[in-house]
Image: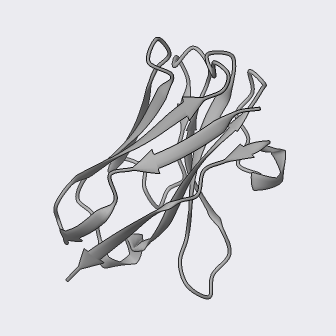
Amino acid sequence: QVELVESGGGLVQAGGSLRLSCAASGHTVSRYTMGWFRQAPGKEREFVGAISWSGGTTFYPDSVKGRFIISRDNAGNTVYLQMSSVKPEDTAVYYCAGRPSAYITIDPRQYNYWGQGTQVTVSS
């Protein structure tokens, strides 16, 4: 069983930066594709990006491409989401998720493990 715990959320001004962390325990996630998702009040969960288990491949939707970067430290069993040039519309609860597969998918139903989420609020 994999447990994921996000941290690093908070209040940030528009145009600023924030780094979220996702620490895994219970099992190594070095063979897991890891994804980040977000959910704003009244909206569906949205894919933010994902990284392959080697870290060699990442994928982002257009809404965050060029502003967000996902990285991972397999030795430390941790995944990161570096958020830059944030906008008020980035305000949401951010979740990390893992799937024991080499393939990236944007479908949240394909991820087996989820963290509890961390709140990110961007002020204008």
Name the quadrant of the N terminus.
top right
Residue 113's image quarter? top right
User: In the figure, 12 relative to 53: above or below?
Assistant: below
User: In the figure, 10 relative to 68: above or below?
Assistant: below
Q: What residue is shown at x 20% (from left), y 83% (from top)?
A: 124
User: In the figure, 67 relative to 76: above or below?
Assistant: below
Horizontal and vertical percent position of residue 90? 39, 69
Residue 121's image quarter? bottom left
Q: What residue is shown at x 52% (from left), y 19% (from top)?
A: 55
Residue 83 in sight here: no
Q: Residue furthest right?
A: 109
Q: Is 121 positioned to the left or the right of 55 in the image?
A: left
Circle count: 0
Q: Residue furthest front?
A: 26
Q: What residue is shown at x 83% (from left), y 53% (from top)?
A: 109
Horizontal and vertical percent position of residue 13? 16, 72
Residue 59 in sight here: yes
User: In the figure, 53 relative to 34: above or below?
Assistant: above
Q: Is 72 positioned to the left or the right of 61 in the image?
A: left
